[in-house]
Amino acid sequence: MAKLQDTLLLYARYVGVSVRSQMQYRASFVMLTFATMLISGLEFVATWALFDRFGSLAGWTLPEAALLYGLVNMAFALAEGWARGFDEFGQMVKSGGFDRLLLRPRSTALQVAGHHVQLMRIGRLAQGAVVFIWAATRLQVAWSPPRVLLCLLAIAGGAALFSGLMVLQATFAFWSTDSLEVFNTVTYGGVETTQYPLTVYRDGFRRFFTYVVPLATVTYYPALAVLGRNDPLGSSLSFQYASPLFGFLFLIVCLRVWNLGVRHYHSTGS
């Protein structure tokens, strides 16, 4: 317990340093945050246009899809904010900066995560929250403590899962000496994919985002439970409530793969 508290305290210090450095240029921070909010807002405009044209999608209305959109984007904004260091890890490997981290008696994953905390992602977080609140006010949902808790758990589980994808992308830099851009099709592409109900996709696609990269377990299934919808795919209510836990399990697996990469790291040789 004491070790965990010490780790969290150290990470908080990393975050504090990163935040203070970004707040040195407050006007730039405000503009970047606003731009992030505007860009992500335009993405929702595309969703709105789709539903305005067709009325519904696989039986889902715009407010229902907006709830799903809000969960996904809040989760991704948190992951982008606190795991940005992994997204930039390839450059650290090429420059030899990772060698310096190995000399410190601390977790390398913790140090990389704290290397760069991107505060401007608050813009995407706020935009996702606004869409989620709008959807919640439009839907006839009997909000109860279990439903509210499930939403919070889905956001946290989603943030953990997206963070795991960034960790996995960074891990491959130990062998490729650069982050593989193909992972962006799963991270950024996964955000776009999971903004819509899983039933609109083909069976193989659904299986991939449920069993391989389990994004559906932190978005689609919790949303079904919150909305009180029956799942055409046959999932039970208990599974829908437990499904966000797969996000945390996925992150644990990715961190194990990270440790494997660290053990096989042989420096840059430069």
Image (spheres, rainbow, N blue to C red):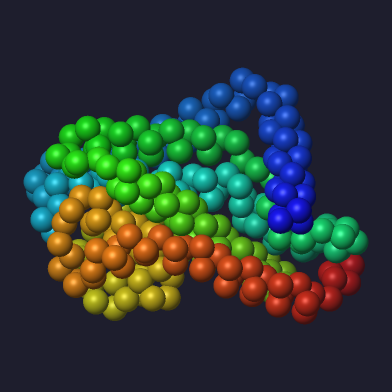
Q: Horizontal and vertical percent for residue 18?
A: 72, 37
Residue at horizontal 85 percent and vertical 71 percent from the top: 267
Can residue 95 be seen by looking at this rendering? no
- In depth, the one of 195 and 216 nearer the eye is 216
Residue at horizontal 61 percent and vertical 20 percent from the top: 27
**In the rendered view, would you say 174 is above or below 70?**
below
- In the displayed structure image, the side of residue 149 where residue 110 appears, left or right: right
- In the displayed structure image, the side of residue 253 where residue 237 appears, left or right: left
Can residue 270 be seen by looking at this rendering? yes
- In the displayed structure image, the side of residue 103 where residue 51 appears, left or right: left
Residue at horizontal 88 percent and vertical 72 percent from the top: 269
**In the rendered view, would you say 212 is above or below 46?**
below
Q: Horizontal and vertical percent for residue 142?
A: 19, 41
**In the rendered view, would you say 158 is above or below 19?**
below
Q: Horizontal and vertical percent for residue 189?
A: 41, 59
Image quadrant assignment for residue 268: bottom right
Quadrant including the C terminus: bottom right
Residue at horizontal 41 percent and vertical 46 percent from the top: 152
Quadrant including the N terminus: bottom right
Q: Horizontal and vertical percent for residue 114?
A: 71, 48
